[in-house]
């Protein structure tokens, strides 16, 4: 049985990382510098993205189940991140609270549109909320990195993030088009997972303590694994045992192409 974080804790982690993101933005000397890990954006544009995105997620959950996401708001009518520092901070806080209010009202089991219909994650508000933790956490890292003060993701966020990424982003029922393989991922904090890649797709499971070694073992802190998943650090930053080709192919593979 997967060790999924309970919904109230998910909401707490969203709030925690949102506060950290706002603090990182507030500490930046210049919001018009480019973000190395998001080179198309400045810090100000990244803040706009994060605020707009939380409002968008609130609308998706509020709309309930659907084959398509609710129509996007006309950009001319969409709120724009204020340039004033205090107003920007308040706007970001409001964006997060709007999303959290809708999540609290919906609870974890309400169906909603998601982009991951063929993964192991359910199409529910609870699963969407889990994914928000990682988006906000990784973008907080982006802001810190831009200022030369990058910090590892907090352990509780990162361990949750490994499981969430593997079941939501990596897992799929689309047949694996390459040589079948098993990839074991180990965190220094303790939890481990196995990805099974074959004609049935990509499946994630907790790794049994007595399991035979897979074709590839990847080891690192949970933060390092999450940052690798989101292309913030290279695979070379992690310890690997075995042939890394399956991991490299998985990183490049788009099952929906």
Image (cartoon, rainbow, N blue to C red):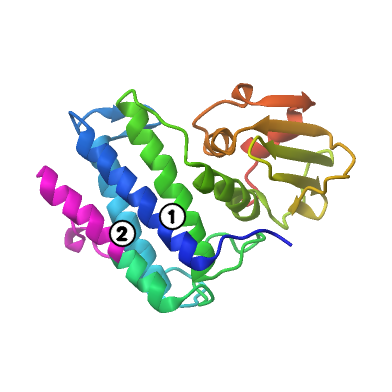
Please report the residue visible at 65 percent of the width from the left and 54 percent of the height from the top. Answer: 167
> Looking at the image, can residue 48 be seen?
yes
> Looking at the image, can residue 81 be seen?
no
User: Which x, y percent locates residue 2?
Assistant: 69, 59
- As drawn, the residue found furthest toward the left would be 84
User: Which x, y percent locates residue 257?
Assistant: 61, 48
Q: Identify residue for label 2.
A: 96
10 Å neighbourhood of mark 1: few (<14), some, or many (≥20)? many
Quadrant location of residue 63? bottom left
Total labels: the figure holds 2
Quadrant location of residue 244? top right
Q: Mark 1 or mark 2: which comes first in sequence? A: 1
Q: What SS does tag 2 mark?
A: helix
> Along the line of sight, which residue is nearer the eye, 176 or 232?
232
10 Å neighbourhood of mark 2: few (<14), some, or many (≥20)? many
> Along the line of sight, which residue is nearer the eye, 21 or 254?
21
Q: What SS does tag 1 mark?
A: helix
- Give the quarter of the figure containing the N terminus: bottom right
The span from disc 1 to disc 2 (Cα, nearest Å) is 12 Å
Q: In this view, does 125 lie above or below 165?
A: below
Q: Does the magenta stretch include residue 94?
A: yes
Q: Identify residue for label 1.
A: 13
Viewer-nearest of discs 1 and 2: 1
Magenta span covers which residues?
A: 70-97
């Amino acid at each position: 049985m997967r060790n999924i974080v309970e919904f109230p804790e998910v909401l707490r982690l969203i709030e925690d990382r949102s506060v950290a993101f706002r603090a990182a933005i507030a500490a930046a000397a210049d919001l018009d510098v480019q973000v190395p890990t998001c080179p198309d954006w400045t810090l100000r544009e990244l803040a706009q993205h994060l605020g707009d995105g939380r409002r968008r997620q609130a609308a998706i959950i509020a709309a309930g189940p659907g084959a398509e996401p609710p129509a996007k708001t006309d950009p001319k009518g969409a709120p724009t991140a204020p340039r004033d520092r205090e107003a920007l901070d308040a706007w970001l806080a409001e964006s997060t609270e709007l999303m959290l209010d809708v999540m609290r009202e919906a609870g974890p089991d309400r169906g909603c549109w998601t982009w991951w219909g063929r993964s192991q994650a359910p199409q529910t508000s609870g699963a969407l909320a889990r994914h928000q933790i990682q988006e906000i956490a990784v973008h907080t890292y982006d802001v810190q990195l831009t200022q030369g003060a990058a910090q590892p993701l907090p352990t509780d966020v990162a361990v949750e993030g490994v499981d969430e990424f593997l079941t939501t982003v990596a897992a799929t029922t689309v047949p694996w088009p390459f040589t079948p393989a098993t990839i074991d991922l180990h965190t220094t904090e303790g939890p481990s997972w196995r990805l099974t890649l074959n004609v049935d797709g990509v499946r994630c499971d907790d790794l049994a303590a007595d399991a035979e070694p897979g074709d590839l073992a990847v080891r690192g802190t949970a933060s390092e694994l999450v940052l690798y998943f989101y292309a913030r650090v290279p695979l070379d930053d992690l310890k690997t045992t075995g042939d890394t080709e399956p991991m490299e192919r998985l990183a490049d593979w788009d099952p929906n192409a």
